[in-house]
Image: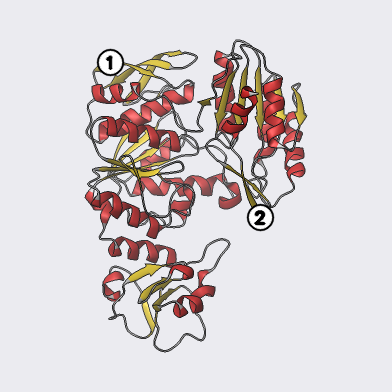
Amino acid sequence: MKLNELLKGLTYEIIQGSDNIEINNIGWDSRKVLSNSLFICVRNRNVDRHSYASAAIQNGAVALVIEHDIEEVPAKVTIIKVEDSKKAMASIANIYFGEPSKKFNLIGITGTNGKTSVTYFVYKVLENAGRLTGIIGTIENKVGDKELKTEKLNPTTPDSIELQASFKEISEAGGSDVVMEVTSSALDKGRVYECDFNIGAFTNLTQDHLEEHGTMENYKNAKLKLFKKCKKTLTNIDDPVSKEIIETASGEVFTYGIERAADFKAFDIVYGLNFIEFSLSFKSQIKNVKFNVPGKFSVYNALATIGICYLSGLELEEIIEGLKNITGVPGRIEKIANDKEILTIVDYAHSPDSLENIIKSMKDIARGKVITVFGCGGNRDTSKRPIMGDIAGKLSDFVVITSDNPRNENPAAIIDEIEQGILKTNCDYIKSENREEAIYTALGKANSGDVVIIAGKGHETYQILGDNIIHFDDREVARKYFSR
């Protein structure tokens, strides 16, 4: 494809060479550059790819897209200057892969909590209805039951080249729908720029990712960007941010909720040990919904799933039938089977609101004590650590504070910051830096009828300690304990 075709719609300056050259590949990783490639120099928080332009040229790049000047570029290499290389990369990738998001029903889900669960539930319901569906998110990247071949480096929303390559792969497989998690970071960094979203859904907004966004206002504004890109918006009316979403969304807006009047409203809710059941009101219809995932937040997740699938063209009856077949999401309220009658839950809860939700939900159904074991990630928002300690202490009967992914921080120092919050409560607790020992301690404190919540890592199968990544899976550790 000609370079000038890839640059269509962009404002750019030719610093050197010609835009009338053939490009066989595009990329931002100099190690993966092939012959006749366009190398896009993107600037991220930690890495400026302009520094790798020489390596990319040595590996075969014949053109560069830059945001700021680079010295000593050979005269044979074309240089294109743009204002924002990340947005330029998204636009170029969209054209390079044939504008794939226009070929299916693209659904984007954003919010602090619930993105992964709702994405997974929508995928399962659409598949149950016979629709070949792609899913892109934290846990899975597949179309139907086949894993995508495209490598994904970012844990949740891929960078724009990987994303558009995934879209093309799903389209070529015949996918009619794609449901994906859309993070605030992806929205802020332009990864989903030029994506043709049909439906955008909002779950909630609570404190998280302040290490990246700085303030809650910035975090909120990043989320709001999604709904200016969607033909249809579905929002949780019980969250205060919905007011702004309704005012600023570019397309038709639908609502769901429990507390306030909504298009998709749940009432007469029954909370069971392993399920929720509620009446659904939509227009003039009343339907009974049973969902085999416990907790109040699961009502919201079910409502979001129902709304998204209805806006995607399914009938309420087939959506409700699809929900019946779902038993949960890996690492989200995942139960660890045991013969001790201890309800053991592994959950990804790693923000104040998500931790509060999971403990409250389990407290509502516990026959005995609630024991919580958790930590906080390193190199992340430090202000939430004492807040989470306070929440765990107020709602639990016993707490074990431990390591999560300490990364390049001192694990003991992170634990001490969490402890400052729990000291304000009357809760009994201990500190244990070794996460396996912490889980064993929590389970050892439990008796029949008690609930043990292992929070923070969920589906993750690793732990990040300094610059090392070791194998670690909360679920494996819990199963190992019970098998002794």
Return the residue at label 1: 286
Residue 191 seen from this side:
yes
Q: Position of residue 363 (x, y in %)?
A: 59, 17
Q: Residues within 10 Å of mark 1 (few under 14, many from 20)?
A: few
| Viewport quadrant of the C terminus | top right
Looking at the image, what colour scheme do you see? secondary structure
Question: What kind of residue is marked 2?
Answer: Asp
Q: Is residue 466 left or right of residue 338?
A: right
- Hey, which quadrant is residue 467 in on the image? bottom right
Quick one: SS at disc 1?
strand
Q: Position of residue 447 (x, y in %)?
A: 67, 13
Return the residue at label 2: 467
Question: What kind of residue is marked 1?
Answer: Ile
Select label 1 or label 2 by which is in front: 2
Gap in Å between the C-alphas at discs 1 and 2? 54 Å
Which residue is more in the foreground, 131 or 183?
A: 131
Quick one: SS at disc 2?
loop
Q: Quick check: 298 above or below 226?
A: above
Which residue is more in the foreground, 465 or 91?
A: 465
Q: Residue at x 37, y 41 (%)?
A: 247
Residue 196 seen from this side:
no
Q: Residue at x 54, y 74 (%)?
A: 51
Q: Position of residue 231 (x, y in %)?
A: 27, 44
